[in-house]
Amino acid sequence: MVMDTADLRWIATGMILIVSFAGVGCPFLAMRTNEKLLHSTFFQLMRVLCTGLVVSVALLHVLADGQDYLRNVSEYPVADAAALVGIFLMVAIKEMGTMALHYLKPPNKNGVEECLLNKEADHGFGHTHGLPSIELHDLDLAGQPLRRFVVYMMEVSIMVHSVLVGLALGVLKKRVAILCLTAALLFHQFFEGLALGAVAVKNGFSFRCSWHLFLTFTLACPIGAVLGIFFADQYDPEDYRTAWTLGVLNALAAGTLLHIGLVELLPEDFRECSGCRNTPPRWANLLALFVGGTIMAVLAVWA
């Protein structure tokens, strides 16, 4: 029997809202204090552990719930197909942003600017927990309209997929799955906000002029969670239409989480970083990844 977890989901939504604001605001604060604190071994290992949590939650809980909803209404593997659509949707968001950037960039840039724009496009339209500001540390980027366009496009891209990720939390019904996904999303939102804020700082955005950045990123994931809570609370086990709705929403959310975990987070977690200090050894990263996955695999026995 699945208990009513609406209160727990509302609390999780509030926590994510606070952490999202803290994450996007950290680069503005770090410019005045010490940004090296964000590169500690502990934070890097927790990042990898949360990647394991995200992937295992997607497969063992979110997708499984979608299959449960749809099993009795269709013999076709609708949940798997919807998860595939979710994966392709995330790819499309990234690629459309990248194409827009390359279409609008001026043709008279030098080689250094070209290289930097390509790097920033990778950071902006993907989903990274890295700090792109470090690569731009000694450059004066203020006053370049194209650089500001990068930030705006990055903001829109992150906003769309944050809504989808929040949806994954909102439609969950199992207490253990909600707690674990909330823990993963807290790190997810913090580090993603960190990347977005870092790009904004290095592109000449002041704290006062970044209100739209704070507003959209802080509210995107909670809005998705609220929508998910609304749809989940309308569930009637006797109505096949609600089974279709919640099943497809869960499966889409699972595909979104799978893409984020396997395509965006995992390569970034194991990327070589020659200039980084306090980088954990690879065996420690692997151990953290397995621990994150094992936690959800064990909890799936009861939840």
Image: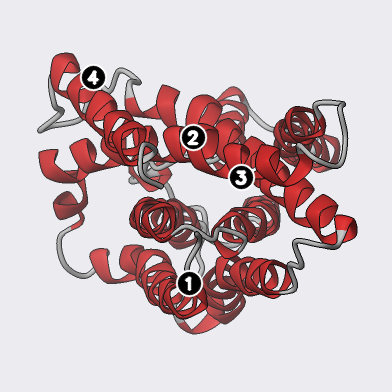
Q: Does residue 26 sit above or below 263 in this rendering?
A: below
Per the image, the residue denoted by label 4 is 286
The nearer-to-camera label among 4 and 2 is 2
- Label 4 or label 3, whichever comes before in sequence order: 3
Task: Answer few, some or many: residues within 10 Å of disc 2's Cα (few below 14, many 20 plus, some between 14 and 19).
Answer: many
Marks 3 and 2 close (CB-CB < 8 Å) = no
How far apart marks 4 and 3 lie (CA) works out to 28 Å
Per the image, the residue denoted by label 1 is 5
Q: Which one is in front, 290 or 47?
A: 290
Marks 3 and 1 close (CB-CB < 8 Å) = no
How far apart marks 3 and 2 lie (CA) works out to 8 Å
Per the image, the residue denoted by label 2 is 60
Q: Which one is in front, 100 or 190?
A: 190
User: Which residue corresponds to the image point at 61% horizontal and 68% vertical from the top-left?
Assistant: 220
The percent coordinates of residue 16 (x first, y second) are: 43, 69
Q: How many marks?
A: 4
Q: Secondary structure at mark 3?
A: helix
Q: Quadrant of the rendered structure where residue 159 is?
A: bottom right
- Label 4 or label 2, whichever comes before in sequence order: 2
The nearer-to-camera label among 4 and 3 is 3
How far apart marks 4 and 1 lie (CA) works out to 33 Å
Q: Secondary structure at mark 2?
A: helix
How far apart marks 2 and 1 lie (CA) works out to 19 Å
